[in-house]
């Protein structure tokens, strides 16, 4: 949302003697990459969330690590759960297996279809799942639909939440870009209980050292990356 749009909404509300509220996270700028200055310049009152009320402690800590955000201990939810996990693939068949396993595992953990979602960090036509009709033998849909696996992207799912989230189409080579990491943070923050990342291993095995170094971490393998983000490999 642009500064002009915010100001217009504020003026309309003020004209009708109403109250104008904006709920936002500075780190979830994915629609437009520039920060919104209007809020800082015009907000009459600011209320900051003192505690994460959506994510488990493990998910919140992991997603904060992705963007290098240092959370106050008091902010992290006291509700604990499963550690986020990461799976690697190099081709479409590998991605499809990860998706099948995700749906299978979630159903076995008594997570309903309507409580899970698969999120791409790209537009759906550019997703590795474009044209896929079924996952784990279950029909897919690009809209929430009973009895189907919902596939959408981070942009469309922003502001919503699901019990279980699988993030896909994350290229390893793009992890050095802050915007890519912000997309991961935004999508991963939608998960209330289960979070899994499907990372496309589009770098050579000996390329992890340079990648991790650019991200401010140490190590030479995918396991070092997962440790850096507080995840585990599955």
Image: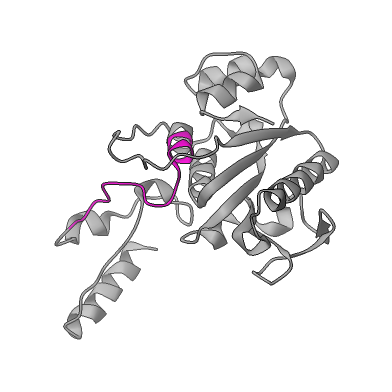
Q: Secondary structure of the magenta portion, mostly? A: loop
Does residue 145 appear left or right of residue 179 in this picture?
Answer: right
Residue 194 inside the magenta-drawn segment: no
Residue under the image location 75 percent in, 49 percent down: 104
Q: Position of residue 118 (x, y in %)?
A: 66, 53
Q: Is 51 placed above or below 161 here?
A: above
Residue under the image location 55 percent in, 34 percent down: 83
Q: Is residue 169 visible?
A: yes
Q: Quadrant of the N terminus?
A: bottom left
Q: Nearer the viewer, residue 83 or 203?
A: 83
What residue range appears in magenta?
Answer: 46-62
Residue 56 inside the magenta-drawn segment: yes
Q: Position of residue 214 (x, y in %)?
A: 52, 21
Q: Quadrant of the C terminus?
A: top right
Figure disc tally: 0
Does residue 28 appear left or right of residue 85 in this picture?
Answer: left
Q: Is 89 placed above or below 38 here?
A: above
Q: Nearer the viewer, residue 123 or 224?
A: 224
Splitting the image into 4 quarters, where does residue 133 fall? bottom right
Of all residues, the one furthest to the bottom in this rendering is 16
Q: Position of residue 190 (x, y in %)?
A: 50, 52
Residue under the image location 58 percent in, 26 percent down: 226
């Amino acid at each position: 949302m642009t500064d002009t749009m915010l100001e217009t909404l504020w003026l309309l509300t003020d004209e009708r003697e109403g109250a104008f509220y904006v709920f936002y996270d500075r780190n979830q700028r994915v629609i437009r990459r520039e920060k919104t200055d209007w809020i800082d310049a015009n907000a009459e009152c600011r209320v900051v969330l003192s505690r994460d009320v959506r994510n488990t402690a493990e998910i919140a800590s992991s997603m904060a690590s992705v963007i290098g955000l240092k959370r106050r201990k008091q902010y992290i939810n006291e509700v604990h759960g499963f550690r986020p996990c990461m799976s690697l693939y190099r081709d479409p068949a590998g991605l499809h297996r990860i998706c099948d396993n995700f749906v299978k595992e979630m159903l076995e953990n008594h997570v309903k279809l309507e409580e899970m979602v698969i999120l791409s960090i790209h537009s759906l036509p550019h997703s590795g799942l474009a044209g896929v009709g079924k996952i784990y033998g279950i029909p897919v849909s690009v809209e929430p639909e009973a009895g189907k696996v919902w596939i959408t992207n981070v942009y469309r799912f922003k502001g919503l939440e699901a019990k279980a989230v699988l993030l896909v189409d994350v290229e390893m080579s793009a992890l050095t870009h802050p915007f890519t990491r912000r997309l991961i943070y935004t999508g991963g923050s939608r998960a209330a209980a289960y979070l899994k990342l499907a990372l496309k291993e589009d770098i050579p095995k000996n390329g992890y050292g340079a990648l991790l170094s650019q991200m401010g971490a140490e190590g030479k393998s995918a396991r070092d990356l997962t440790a850096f983000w507080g995840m585990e490999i599955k």
